[in-house]
Image (cartoon, helix red, strand yellow):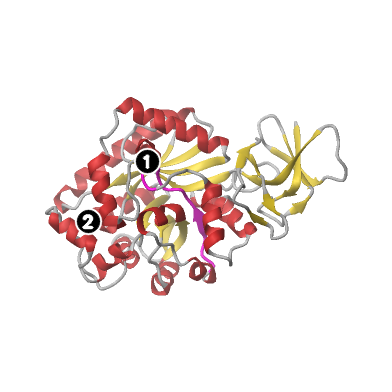
Amino acid sequence: MRKISANYLFPVSGAPIKNGYVAVDDNGTVIETGVLEKECADTEFYNGILVPGFVNAHCHSELSYLKGYFRQATGMSGFIDQINELRNVAPKEERIGKIREAFRQMYSEGVSAMADICNCAESFEIKAESPLKTVSFIELFGTDPKEAEEIVEGGKRLRDKAKEMGLEAAVTPHACYTMSPELLAMAAKEGLKDGTVSYHSQESFQEEELLVSGTGALAENYRGRGLPTPPVTGDSALLYFIERLLTFAKAPVEGRILLIHNVATNQKSIDRALKTLKEPYWVLCPLSNIFIHRQLPPVELMMENNLKICIGTDSLSSNTVLSIVEEMKCLQKNFSCITLPQMLEWATLNGAKAVGMEKRLGSIEKGKQPGIVLIDNIDWNNFALTGESKSRRLV
């Protein structure tokens, strides 16, 4: 058994505990929490705050080999061009090595679970061996409706391979602009059979232009490559997605739906989602949004609507780090309305709920195995992170 204490314990399921402690057994299961009345020889004490292990609610670990290759501030159109140009820049051995390195780094910094986007099986063996729990979202693309059924069948085969290796996995759509309407609906329907889908939603205003008016840089990019674009609806990418869901399901649509990025979301989109989706989660990847677009989601609006917000890192093609603490620093710097306890809930318990792991992860409660993480260099006067704050796993 280990008894671990710090200046504050953040159970997340309850209020922060000054001089709090957590006791865990040899398997990392929480035995009890409380206030440390006095320092004891059997207690480990750390300067900082103790929090449950993080849940990275959106990552593309397969793209870890692309760190440092991409130009910033190109917008979505420029980013897609770079993906197409650089996807084969490294051999398989290097790609797998970078995935392994990313998993080690994230776990050591406190990530206990992750929603990970997959386009192939290169991460599966690493996931099967890693203590970092994952849900592998098998992401589908395809703008030709005649190919939709074949693409879904390929996604199902990859999902089944993941499950055969003991991994949680589900088929998922990518985004409105990379899929025919038919494939978008079919992929979402298949994914929701496993309980969860992850959808890149309103990631950029270029995406919104494409759906609203059929214009803009993204529309020109696709037409320039001879690819079809989604139908012009006069409305947002999120409403377009919801309409595809309603072709096979009735509102409120059952299942966990992770809406990723949300840079261009607005009140109309939020209202429609809350009315139509039973369990939506709104995932923020702020460092990626700045990297690609130099823009951020309307977080104040999202908070005003009491949305279930989570935090992700996206990939090392659109980020320089895979660090939940760095994402929280970015949010804190740009949105003074956010408190540290709120961000920690987004980074832990909300993420655990989004991937269906809240019974064992996400909060420091008796019987759970969330992992125990130390965040140091806290600004105690403002109860906030500092530029020097780092996280490291203790359990």
Q: Position of residue 117 (x, y in %)?
A: 38, 44
Q: Position of residue 212 (x, y in %)?
A: 26, 71
Give above or below for 23 relative to 264. Answer: above
Q: Tags 2 and 1 in contact by the CB under 8 Å rule?
A: no
Q: Position of residue 189 (x, y in %)?
A: 32, 53
Question: Going 20% across and 62% down the picture, which residue do you hit?
Answer: 219
Question: Going 52% across and 62% down the picture, which residue do you hit?
Answer: 334
Residue 285 seen in this snapshot: no
State the predominant SS element of the stretch in magenta. Answer: loop
Quadrant of the image for the C terminus?
Answer: top right
Regarding mark 2 in the picture, which secondary structure is present there? helix
| Alpha carbons under labels 2 and 1: distance apart | 36 Å
Give above or below for 141 relative to 101. Answer: below
Quadrant of the rendered structure where residue 270 is? bottom left
Disc assigned to residue 182: 2
> Horizontally, is 278 left or right of 82 in the view?
right
- Per the rendered image, the range of residues in magenta is 306-318
Badge 2 local density, few (<14 within 10 Å), some, or many (20+)? some
**For the residue marked with disc 1, what is the amino acid?**
Gly
Disc assigned to residue 68: 1
Q: Nearer the viewer, residue 214 or 307?
A: 214
Quadrant of the rendered structure where residue 66 is? top left
